[in-house]
Image (cartoon, rainbow, N blue to C red):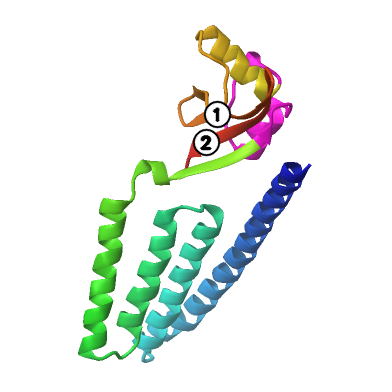
Amino acid sequence: MKRDLQDMIHELTYYLELIIAIIMSIIIAVMTFKLLAVAVPDFFVGEKIELGFFLEKAMMLAIGLEFVKMLCKHTPSTIIDVLLFAIARQMIVEHTTPLENLITIVALAALFATRKYLLCNFDETEKRVYRGSQKTKITNHMARINIPIEEGDTLAKVVTTVLNREERTIAIGACVWYNDFALRIDSMNGDKVTRVEVIKSV
């Protein structure tokens, strides 16, 4: 019961984040058109364009877009992208001192090094646990994957069918691998699979 409630709250927060991302995308689109409406007429009539003002607004919109991506995909790389844009904006738009510029450059270099050397493909995964009795079609829709329906109408049936076919032991931790996702037995009650974890690359 507790795990079911946790799963329900997790799903709710996921959809709330998507709603926030949609709202922010609409706001960013409106602000982009407003920025163009201000800059383009001034350019064609020969008015002086405040480059600093334009850069500040453009960088804020770029940071907003990266934040939307972070809401949609909870990965280390998207978080680093948001930080990169935020730090770069500070150096480009603001009138900072040479020392502050040096600190900003060091911070950017550290973020680039982190993304290149400390992140691996294993970090770019999304994991969710579902009931073993959950229908395969529903899981495909919720997790945005493509589990072959012919292998079973429930998650428990899919993993047991594949493990039996491959003559592998049905136990907690056993995995069934597909192209871009895997199914792992998370818990069992005797011989019955009660929960299955969906692991997919993002």
Figure quadrant of residue 158: top right
Q: Mark 2: give few (<14), some (14-19) or many (20+) Cα within 10 Å.
A: some
What residue is at 47 percent from the left and 72 percent from the top?
61
Vertical side of 141 occupied by 28: above or below: below
Vertical side of 121 occupied by 137: above or below: above
Label 2 sits on a secondary structure element that is strand
Query: How far is disc 2 from disc 1 in space, using C-alphas?
Result: 8 Å
Q: Which residue is mark 1?
A: 184
Q: Which residue is mark 2?
A: 199
Vertical side of 50 occupied by 138: above or below: above
- Marks 2 and 1: CB-CB under 8 Å? yes
What residue is at 70 percent from the left and 45 percent from the top?
7
Residue 45 visible within the image: no
Q: Nearer the viewer, residue 7 or 31?
A: 7
- Residue 59, given in percent of the width and then of the height, sits at 41, 75
Q: Nearer the viewer, residue 146 or 192?
A: 192
- Residue 142, given in percent of the width and then of the height, sits at 66, 39
| Quarter of the image where the N terminus is located | top right
Q: Nearer the viewer, residue 26 or 82?
A: 82
Vertical side of 48 occupied by 26: above or below: above
Q: What kind of residue is marked 1?
A: Arg
Label 1 sits on a secondary structure element that is strand
Figure quadrant of residue 138: top right
- Residue 176, given in percent of the width and then of the height, sits at 52, 22
Of badges 2 and 1, the one in the foreground is: 1
Q: Is residue 44 left or right of residue 70?
A: left
- Residue 6, given in percent of the width and then of the height, sits at 71, 48
Asked if the magenta segment contains residue 175, the reply would be no
Q: Nearer the viewer, residue 42 or 150?
A: 150
Q: Which residues are magenta?
A: 130-153
